[in-house]
Amino acid sequence: MTAYFSSVLALGKRPSAFVPIAMSVAALLMVLASIAVSGVVRETDEGAVAHLWQILMGGQLPLLAFFLIKWLPRAPKAALSMLALQILAALAAMAPVYILGL
């Protein structure tokens, strides 16, 4: 069991594993900062925050594909665990947008 956790932690130090999580956290923080500054505002035209959020979320897809292609054959259990963390981070970034209807 300890070897499994150490392999997940070692894999988590790879850029292909932590960059998508960092991008999701950045997208979430941008949305929360925008809400904190101007409140929940539904604009007719999307603002810069919406465009940056879309770039950050969409930019994760090639990184996730690279991560899966490289690490799934080498370390399947650790790669699937890290993929689950990446998906949870992306869902956390999407939650305020969905819930508040932004």
Image (tube, grey):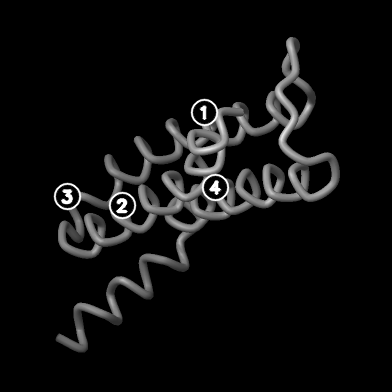
Number of on-image labels: 4
Q: Compute the Cα span from label 4 to label 2.
A: 13 Å
The amino acid on which the numbered mark 1 sits, given as a three-letter code, is Gly
Residue topped by disc 3? 73
User: How far across and how far down the image is residue 48, in percent?
Assistant: 79, 26
Mark 2 or mark 3, whichever is nearer to me: 2
Query: Does residue 51 appear left or right of residue 12 in this picture?
Result: right
Name the residue at 20% across, 78% down: 4
Mark 1 or mark 3, whichever is nearer to me: 1
Mark 4 or mark 2, whichever is nearer to me: 4
Q: Which mark is residue 70?
A: none
User: How far across and how far down the image is residue 98, in percent?
Assistant: 49, 34
Label 2: how many residues lie within 10 Å, few (<14), some (14-19) or many (20+)? Answer: some
The amino acid on which the numbered mark 4 sits, given as a three-letter code, is Ser
Label 1: how many residues lie within 10 Å, few (<14), some (14-19) or many (20+)? Answer: few
Mark 4 or mark 3, whichever is nearer to me: 4
* Disc 3 secondary structure class: loop
Label 4: how many residues lie within 10 Å, few (<14), some (14-19) or many (20+)? Answer: many
Q: Which mark is residue 58?
A: 1
Q: Compute the Cα span from label 1 to label 3.
A: 24 Å
* Disc 2 secondary structure class: helix
The amino acid on which the numbered mark 2 sits, given as a three-letter code, is Leu
Q: Compute the Cα span from label 1 to label 2.
A: 16 Å
* Disc 1 secondary structure class: helix
Name the residue at 26% across, 80% down: 5
